[in-house]
Amino acid sequence: MRTVGILGGMGPEATILLMQKVMAAVPARDDADHVPLIVHQNSQVPSRIAALIEGTGPDPGPVLAGMARDLAAAGADALAMPCNTAHHYAPAIRAATDLTFLDMVDLTAAALSAAGARRVGLLASPATRLARVFDAPFGAHGLEPVILPDDAALLELIRAVKSGEPSTRLAPRLAVEADALIEAGADHLLVACTELSLVRNALPERVPSTDSLDVLTEAIVSFSRG
């Protein structure tokens, strides 16, 4: 199997969740049956929120490019990054090495289209919206994003996940945001922040939903075993 390098730490718990999902996706009888991962759990990547929303923080791009080079030097055959917002810096990551980059955003748009989605309710950081991370992939697949006029509550929810608040308190807040997107016309919900993947079970079941982290998990397993 081929080794996948993970640009992690954004946030740390979401990176661990990805590792757990990859492990659970493989019917393994022994250690050697699992997908080999090299994980760069770098919690010191400059804040995407500070850089993209507040305009006060340093550029995360050079740090992410350095992580890509580190993973290549360590023996990775491909790269993946469990952070939707950080895909704004995907060009810097691609330019840093010759490795395949398993682009979670492009893969998610393709998966949504294949699932029959048309109007996709984005459960994402405001930074993802401001950086227009999903605009081109959605446009390429004929998908229309549905975004709440005020996504401050989503940002506070993401920050609460990062700070370690119990999921029992966070889940109802995510359900409220999801319901608002459905009322705004979303026919499909997208968990487009890997912090929110930790409380995805709170989503209402009356419309289909997709988690970008699950899409990335499938791509990692497919690449490694293929």
Image (spheres, rainbow, N blue to C red):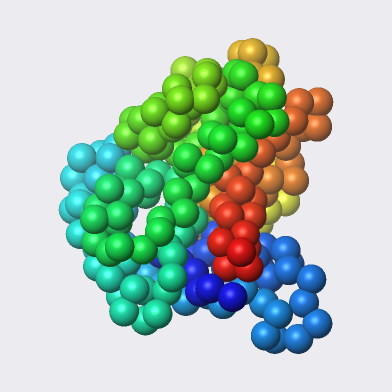
For residue 40, side relative to residue 63 (left or right)? right
Q: Residue 46: x, y in percent?
A: 27, 58
For residue 194, side relative to residue 34 (left or right)? left
Q: In terms of depth relative to the viewer, which is nearer, 97 or 195?
A: 97
Residue at horizontal 56 percent and vertical 35 percent from the top: 110
Q: Which of the image's four quarters has the C terminus?
A: bottom right
Q: Which of the image's four quarters has the N terminus?
A: bottom right
Q: Residue 103: x, y in percent?
A: 45, 49
Q: In terms of depth relative to the viewer, which is nearer, 94 or 15?
A: 94
Residue at horizontal 25 percent and vertical 68 percent from the top: 66
Q: Is residue 178 visible?
A: no
The image quarter containing residue 5 is bottom left
Residue at horizontal 52 percent and vertical 25 percent from the top: 141
Q: Residue 89: x, y in percent?
A: 29, 48
**In the image, residue 86 above or below residue 37:** above
Q: In terms of depth relative to the viewer, which is nearer, 179 or 121?
A: 121
The image quarter containing residue 79 is bottom left
Q: In terms of depth relative to the viewer, which is nearer, 150 or 79?
A: 79
**In the image, residue 14 above or below residue 174:** below
Count numbered badges in the picture. 0
Residue at horizontal 36 percent and vertical 74 percent from the top: 71
Q: Is residue 89 visible?
A: yes
